Amino acid sequence: MIKIPPLGTQSRLVLKAQVALDVMSSELVSLEADATLNEAIELFVDRGIRAAPVIDDAGRAIGVLARVDILAYERTIRIRLTDPGMAESFMGGLDRVRVADLMSPVVYTVKPETPIEEVLDEMRQLKVHHLFVQDSQGVVLGVVSALDIIELIDLE
């Protein structure tokens, strides 16, 4: 519920979180490097997510695949599809392209105890909508998204 203050009064936004752990979603959806592009697309659509870490066998993030990576790949392929014979090749190619081929090897992370102000600063500086939360061994525990933070804001 949004409270609208009377005219002439000051309101302020209050974030009901102290550290990344308070905000993160621990229901993390991840991908394996050898998953196909088709599997990744199905996962993104079915779960309604925009990005997922690519995890190794030990649970550490080795990269990130985002919708923007998939769109960039699709655009590159579309440019190459000026030859009608290439279109058929592409349609069967979704099962040949691996997540490891498209993922970004850069993973932006914070620790569970990172103050929420630092989380927000990181997101702004890096111009990203999510940061992955990892423990001291590099195991990904969850994700903090901009939407997670917005949902914890109260208007007073």
Image (cartoon, helix red, strand yellow):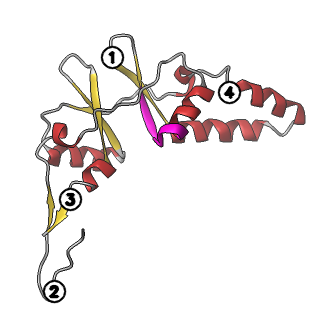
Return the disc, 3 or 1, that comes first in the chain's sequence: 1
Q: Alpha carbon of mark 1 to alpha carbon of mark 2: how far?
A: 50 Å
Q: Alpha carbon of mark 1 to alpha carbon of mark 4: how far?
A: 25 Å
Query: Which residue is tagged 4?
Result: 94
Return the disc, 2 or 4, that comes first in the chain's sequence: 2
Q: How many numbered badges does the structure rendering display?
A: 4
> Residue 63 placed where, x, y %?
42, 25
Query: Which residue is tagged 3?
Result: 153
Q: In terms of secondary structure, where does tag 2 sit?
A: loop
- Give above or below for 137 relative to 147: above
In the image, what residue occupies the spot 12% across and 70% down? 156
Query: Which residue is tagged 1?
Result: 59
Return the disc, 1 or 4, that comes first in the chain's sequence: 1
> Residue 76 placed where, x, y %?
68, 37
Q: Which mark is residue 6?
A: 2
Residue type pointed to by label 1: Gly
